[in-house]
Amino acid sequence: MIGLKTNELISKIEKNMNKELVEGKNLKLTVDLRIQNIVREELYKSLIEYKAKAALAVVMNVKSGEIFSMVSLPDFNPNYPKSILPKTENNLNAEARYEMGSTLKIFNAAMVYESESEIQFNEFEISDGYQITDEKHILDDHINEKILNFDDVFVKSSNIGSVKILESFGPNKQKQFF
């Protein structure tokens, strides 16, 4: 649905909701095309600027679950079927799999910045891994450094560093932040 014009978006939604529509059920969407267009434009600029392979964004009301925008790049124009490539045909927001630790890193970082915590000036030991349970031990084997500063925990995608940041705050603070 990403990058579609209004009539294309409606057509795609109608196709996916055909059963409900045939039964005469009401269908109310929360996608705001103004927000959708702004998010897509800004995300596209970032995709180009950082030479990323893909980019995605969701704007939603976390209390109600309403989705105002959902963008996945690269995308395609359904009016030109030849433009549909395997890497463009899926909405990464809905179809890709992400490790839970990876999805929480950005929230842990935002929590630190928003609280203006001194944690952002700390360094975190990551070389020994992190024991979650007797059976579960996480490693950051993609990182050569043994100690990371707060920014590098996020930049280098350190699960261990992110868990240690969370420990500094405590799980109740994270729940309040959400």
Image (cartoon, helix red, strand yellow):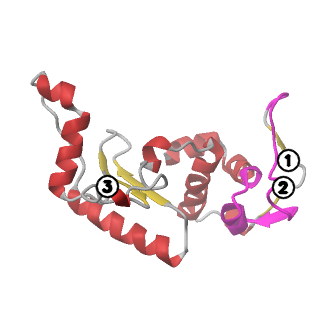
Mark 3 belongs to which amino acid? Pro
The residue carrying mark 2 is 126
Q: CB of mark 1 within 8 Å of CB of mark 3?
A: no
Q: Nearer the viewer, residue 163 or 58?
A: 58
Q: Of marks 3 and 2, which one's residue comes earlier in the chain? A: 3
What residue do we see at 47% from left, 72% from top? Answer: 46
Instruction: Residue 54: give its label.
Output: none
As measured in the structure, the alpha-carbon distance from the residue carrying label 1 to the one carrying label 3 is 47 Å
The residue carrying mark 3 is 81
As measured in the structure, the alpha-carbon distance from the residue carrying label 2 to the one carrying label 1 is 6 Å
Q: CB of mark 2 within 8 Å of CB of mark 1?
A: yes
Say whether residue 19 is left or right of residue 91.
left
As measured in the structure, the alpha-carbon distance from the residue carrying label 3 to the one carrying label 2 is 47 Å
Residue located farthest toward the top when viewing the structure as drawn: 23
Residue located farthest toward the bottom when viewing the structure as drawn: 49
What residue do we see at 38% from left, 43% from top? Answer: 62
Does the magenta-highlighted stretch encompass residue 67? no
Mark 2 belongs to which amino acid? Ile
The residue carrying mark 1 is 129
Q: Nearer the viewer, residue 95 or 159?
A: 95
Mark 3 Cα shell of 10 Å, populated few (<14), some (14-19), many (≥20): few
Q: Of marks 1 and 3, which one's residue comes earlier in the chain? A: 3
- State the SS at label 3: helix
The quadrant where residue 99 appears: top right
What residue do we see at 22% from left, 62% from top? Answer: 34
Tell me if residue 105 can be seen.
Answer: yes
Q: Nearer the viewer, residue 10 or 107?
A: 10
Q: Nearer the viewer, residue 83 or 100?
A: 83
